[in-house]
Each structure stands twice: as C-alpha cells, then as structure tokens.
Image (cartoon, rainbow, N blue to C red):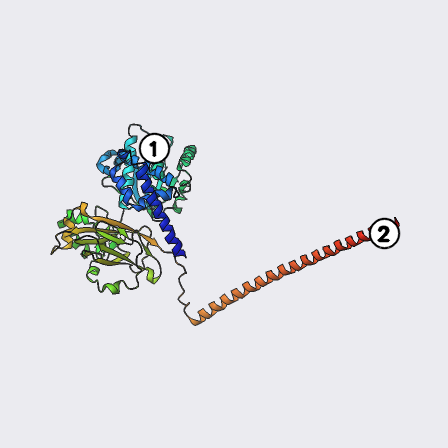
Amino acid sequence: MAELDQHEGEQDIEKKIEETRQRFKNEFLQDSTEKYDSRDVERLQTDDALVEGYLTWRLYAVDDALKMIDESLQWRKEFGLNDLTESSIPKWMFETGAVYLHGYDKEGNKLFWFKVKLHMKDNKTITDKKKYVAFWLERYAKKEPGMPLTVVFDMAESGLSNIDMEFVKYIINCFKVYYPKFLSKMIIVDMPWIMNAAWKIVKSWLGPEAISKLKFASRSEIQTFIGPEYLPPHMGGTDPFKYSYPPLPDDDFQTPICDNGPIVGEDDVESKEGEMEGKDALSESSFNSEVAVKPKKVNFLEDSLRSEDNDRGDAGTRTKGVRKPLTTFKGPLLDVSPAEELSFGSGETEKKCLIILSNVTKNQVAFKVRTTAPEKYRVKPSSSCCEPGASVDIVVSLHGGSQASPQDRFLVMAAEMENAGSQELAQFWKDVSKTKIMEHRLRCHVLESEKPAASPLRDSPVETVSSGQQELNTALMRVMACNSRLEQKMNTCLWVQKVLIGLVLVLVALNLLCLFMLGSSQRQS
C-alpha cells in the first residue's frame, strides 16, 4: 500500500513538472525569448530536479513556481552566470577572505562563511560583490548539485558600519529565489545587541518558508550546529585553517597518513615528478620518523593501497551481501548508482556499499574513485576501465573499526579513451584534458542503529533466560497495573451508577408525593 501511494505521489510530481514546463513555454517564452539565457531554458526543459526544486520551495503551487523561475532566470542572464569565471571577479575580493566555502556542519552540509567585519558598504563595488557571491554559489551548485549549504555570518568584531542592508537582502534572495532548496540553515554567530533591529528586518525578508532556517547562536551555542574541527579558535574551535588566495579554498580535504606514508596530491606529482621520487623514497625509509612530505595542494585522494586494485578477485564474491543502489545519476559518460549518497551503518551488512558505473558511450571509459578519507575506506577497484555498454561494480567498505561520517565525500572521475590500446591508465590521466573529465560527487549518509551494541555476555543462556524473565515480569507488572486501573474505573462507574439510581428513586418518590398531595387537595375541595 505504501509503495502504491509512493508511486502515485511520484506520478503527481511528474505531472506538476510537465505542467510547469508547458506553462513556462506558453506563458513566458512566446514573446520574450531574449529575457533568458538559452542554456538556462534548455536546462529547465531537461533537468527534472531543477523544476522540482522550484515546485518544492513553493509547496507545489505552479503559479508561484513560475514567478520564481521567471525572476531567477532573468537574474542569471543579468549577471551572466553561465559565463562567470574566477577572472570575471576583481582579484582583491578573493584576497580579502570575506566570503568563502570551507568545512561542514554536523549534518554534512558545506559551510558558506561571511566574515562581516571585512565588509564595508560601498555603492561603487556593490555589483561586483553580488557577482562574487553568485560565483561561489554557482561554482558549488555545479560541483555538488542538489547539496544544501549552511550559511554562517561571523559577526565577531563587527558593527553597524559593516551592515549593508541591500547586500544582505541580495544574499537572502539568492537562497529564497535564485537557488531553491539550497539553504540548509543560516547561522548568525555572536551578533552584537546593537544590530537586533537590523536583523529583525532581515527576518521579515526570509518569508515563512525559510524563517525556520534562521538560527542565532553565541560562541558557546555554535557547537550545537558545527563541530569544533570546523570552527575557528575565536569560536572555541580547533580548526587551523587560515584563508589564503590563490588557490580557491573550496576543497578543504586534509592529507591523511596511510600505510605507505603521506599521500601526495596528483597535481604535485605532475609538477614535480623528479623531486617527488626522492621524497617518496625518503618517506618510505623513514615512515616512523618525524620526517613527512607535505603537499602544497589539498585535493581528493585516491585509495591508499594500490595493491588492492590488483587483487580484485571474483566480482560475484566481492559484491555478495552488498546492498544494491536504488537511484541513478545519468552522466554524459557514465551512469552512476547511487545518484547522491552512500549509506553506512554499524551492522555487518551496512559496512559496505556498492557503486555501479555503466558506460553509455561507444568508447572505452577510464574511471577512478577518490575519497576525502582514504584512511577510513577501501575501494575495489578504485581505478580501471569500463567497456562500451558494460557496467562495473565497485565495492566501498569501511576499513577496520572506522566509522562513516556525514562529512566524508567520494568523487567519481571518468574520461573517454578514444584511442584505447596499450596506453597505461596512469599516463592517460596525466595526459587527458581536465575539460574532458566527468566528475560526480557522492556524500555519506550514516544509518542510525536500531539496537544498542550487544554485551559480550548477552549471548550466554543464563543472560538470555534472565533477560527473558525480566521482560516477562515487566509485561506482567504492566498487565496487573492495567487491571488495577480498569478495576478502579469499574468501581467508579458502579458508584456513579448507584448514585444515579438513587437520584432516580428520589425523583420517583417526589413525583408520587406530588401526586398524593394533589389527590388529597382535590378530595378536600
């Protein structure tokens, strides 16, 4: 029954999406095709998730969703978002560090930081500042589509001179209109009391659909939302991150230490291949020493043990007992299942996940899987090729006693091998152009444990019997208590019944007395 209701619900959503597209075409595109960027219109006609995002944000009211789409697409063309690049923004804006992406909240949402004290109201630069914010949002939307953001306004050392209401309203509109379902929450940290009036106005701009996402937190309360590992020291955190530019600090993945020493970013290997050979040798010979190679650039990292790639074994054995993914991302080179997340739990069957890659091209496709936490996970295979029309099963498993975290991410990279032959994969990845690489990110979802971990003595017969007896005694006590309550209620009901009967008898007696007195008076007369 539940599956039937879900199926009907999906059909209703599909109808709403189709209705929205058709009405947009008929009502907005007929005489005003130049209002929008043709690339945005095309995406609206092909991307179901985009249309559903507008509908969901407007509670599936098509009229409201259409107004939102119209406003959003006009804004995208005005700011030239499809052509907005890093070079389009003045360099000094990046250098200030007033706005940047870094870290995750406790739910695994990316943090979008606004350092309010670094912002000064200036009408001459307001347009560039708006484009600057749009650049970050569009960059993140392309890298991790469908993933929400948590906005953090760091109000430390800020005052009224740092508040630009027009700029704040623009930021609100970005999440309210231009990027539907993009906002996880908006946290205002350490707001000075003098700004209360200003933020009351901001609260009114959010509207009912987003008002619940606004959170005010002091320094002591911020760790309710964000762990100390992603908070700066002035907020009571332990994050050593310091903003610098270049490069853009949006992929803040740390380099872990694994069995073969520090893992070096791929870009460093390409740029300093000869130098790294010597450093690798040093790292291997002094694994237990304090000497370690520190890569310049932080990046997604490949699985630590390359030997595991060679020891693939039988695919059927690898995937035995692993849950099959239910959703699929349709990519230009590979279809990736699941579409968005890998789910891990504490149970034995929940410590492994399956990624299925399906080649949708006419050529061989090379792929590799990277992760932000290679010390936690083992990926088999982490790098290989997929034949035209074929599929590859990749098993991702937690290593040892590691626990999955919502902050963990996986990156599937793929590139078409048009001249496949004896070319080695390592050399192919060095030579291939970055513009030809398909990237798809997967987040981690941590399943909640249904039962607490069992005690080592729990399996013994004595413990089982005593536990069963305890449960039986508890059940009997509940039954007896229930019986006692029922008995009390019955006694109360009987008492009420007796009182009512008594009242009826009194009324009958009074009626008889009245009749007797009436008869006596008639005889006397």
Image location (x, y in percent) of residue 361: 19, 52
The residue at which mark 1 appears reads as: 167
Say which amino acid is labelled 2. Answer: Ser
Q: Secondary structure at mark 2?
A: helix
Q: Nearer the viewer, mark 1 or mark 2?
A: 2
- Residue sitting at x 72%, y 55%: 504
Image location (x, y in percent) of residue 332: 22, 49
- Seen in the image, is 467 located left or right of residue 361? right
Image location (x, y in percent) of residue 321: 30, 63
Q: Is residue 393 visible?
A: yes
For label 1, count other residues whose C-alpha is less than 10 Å away and answer few (under 14), some (14-19) or many (20+).
some
Label at residue 14: none
- Residue sitting at x 33%, y 55%: 343
Mark 1 vs 2: CB contact within 8 A: no
The residue at which mark 2 appears reads as: 520
Of residue 18 and residue 133, the one placed in the foreground of this image is 18
